[in-house]
Image (spheres, grey):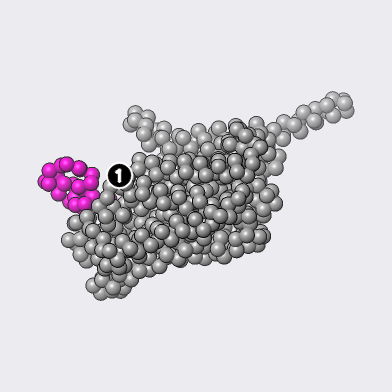
Amino acid sequence: MKTLPIIDLSIIAAYLVGMVAVGIYFSRKNQNADQFTTASGKIPGWAIGLSIYATFLSSNTFLGVPGKAFGSNWNSFVFSLSMPLAAWVATRFFIPFYRSTGEVSAYTHLEHRFGAWARTYAVVCFLLTQLARMGSIFFGIALSLQALTGYPMATIMLVVGSCIIFYTVLGGMEAVIWTEVAQGVIKTGGAVLILWLVVDGMPGGLSKIVEVGQADNKFSLGSFAPDFTQATFWVVLLYGFFMNLNNFGMDQNYVQRYHTTASVREASQSVWLCVYLYVPISLLFFFLGSSLYAYYQANPDLLNAVRMQVATERLPGANPDAIRQLAASLSVADVGDKVMPHFMVNKVPAGMVGLIVAAIMSAAMSTISSGMNASATVFSVDIYQRYVSGALTDKQSLRVLYIATTVFGVLGMFTGIAMIGVKSVLDIWWMLSGIFAGGMLGLFLLGIISRTTRNAEALIATIVGVLVIVWMTLSAQLPDSMAQLRSPLHPNMIMVVGTLTLFLTGLLLTRLRGRGTQAQTAEPQTTASA
């Protein structure tokens, strides 16, 4: 535990007060649900682009990516390399579609296409994805701030979460977007500052970091072998494409922003601005992880201290010998997420710590606030107005949105508390998002691409896709006697296989129905000819 100097505490307090002030400022504009959810379509495209970038650049990136690069290599950077292709598909097909429908919810058209069950299924998957996302981000910020303050992680989540709920409920989407613009700048600056401190403190500087990284294969993008049982280049590329397509193409967090601009062109430009910013900045975070690896290799006492910290957390109340024994057995992958917080506690000078903590908090708050707003919008439009009461006044609609925003913020906090103790925040987020999003994306693609697929075929395809996702997710838990039934594929392939299974099953059933219809039509003609 390290007590922060007054100057750092003042910087953190000023940041929190500033975020809350933004919410209070925009609260006077929220007179109806349209203003709360889409800011009445009056936000400039460049601000939306920075907002989407800030949502992508969450604490999963700020802490999880350097931790992943520290513990392994740059294999996960392939996820970022898939973004341009996913963005092209989204801007070419999805954004014009959403703008033409005028529906603020990404899932309303699924009911028009396949029925109420399809809309409900997508909404449930989306809300579960948001809880997983918010939980992993709450966990990431608590992981860092615990190292700096010594406060319990659960307490940190509750305090930070309360601030996020306050300004998100008050300010609505406009507060979310403009705070994210500021947060995107703050967290990018924080990452550059940390990297500069690491390089400046490294004996031998940048050239030594590159030398150590090359010697220990830290810059590898993974194996290029056609192997889908390991996290190869191709596995991460496929996962990244499908997940980014899900983000840009049907995630309410992003779809909702497309309606806040004045035109399709501005909405598309906002997506490309996000890509142009995120790809190089994510590379910076991977290089930061590799730089920390070289720094801690050059300072083995610091690395041993991190191992002792992790061992102590895993064996609370154990005797010192047991803790030392466990610490000695821990690999760099076991301690990756703890390294950057440890560096901040011990090597960042007073005054700069407050700036970096503000950057980490902004990384979490930007994504959580947008997730809360999007979840509340989906709940209001797709659940409350669909199944409870469709005729709401402006005042009633705002009340539902306020309550839903608060509830989802609280649920996100408790999800984060439940994640305490996981090995890698990035791994747990990728796994959960792949499970929940796979079937949703497959159903959406089926509805957009196959115009002739009907309700029955879509329902059967969804059931098949969900069964495949459940099997791939749970097969690792099967006993050794049933080992032949386990999925041989890497967990990241759950998203890919689940999406393709649902989509292709729907196309096959549609084709079989078409052939059956043609056969029935041709039979009477044959009989008449005879």
Q: How many marks?
A: 1
Q: Is residue 326 magenta?
A: yes
240 horizontally vs 339: left or right: right
- Residue 61, position in %: x, y? 40, 57
Residue position marked by numbered label 1 in the rendering: 421
Q: Quadrant of the C terminus?
A: top right
- Residue 527, position in %: x, y? 84, 25
At x 36% / y 49%, what residue is drawn? 159
- For label 1, the SS is loop
Report the predominant secondary structure element of the magenta stretch: helix
- Residue 336, position in %: x, y? 30, 55
The residue at the far right in this view is 529
Q: Which residues are magenta?
A: 307-336
Q: Residues within 10 Å of mark 1 (few under 14, many from 20)?
A: few
Q: Is residue 239 magenta?
A: no
At x 55% / y 32%, what residue is drawn? 463
Residue 109 against residue 344 in the figure, above or below:
above
- Residue 419, position in %: x, y? 35, 43
Residue 510 appearing in the image: no
Residue 276 against residue 59 in the figure, above or below:
below
Residue 45 against residue 170 in the figure, above or below:
below
Residue placed most toward the observer, 230 or 327: 327
Q: Quadrant of the N terminus?
A: bottom left
Residue 168 appearing in the image: yes
At x 55% / y 33%, what residue is drawn? 464
Residue placed most toward the observer, 18 or 248: 18
Residue type highlighted by circle 1? Gly
At x 68% / y 35%, what residue is drawn? 454
Residue 348 against residue 23 in the figure, above or below:
below
Residue placed most toward the observer, 332 or 172: 172
454 horizontally vs 438: left or right: right
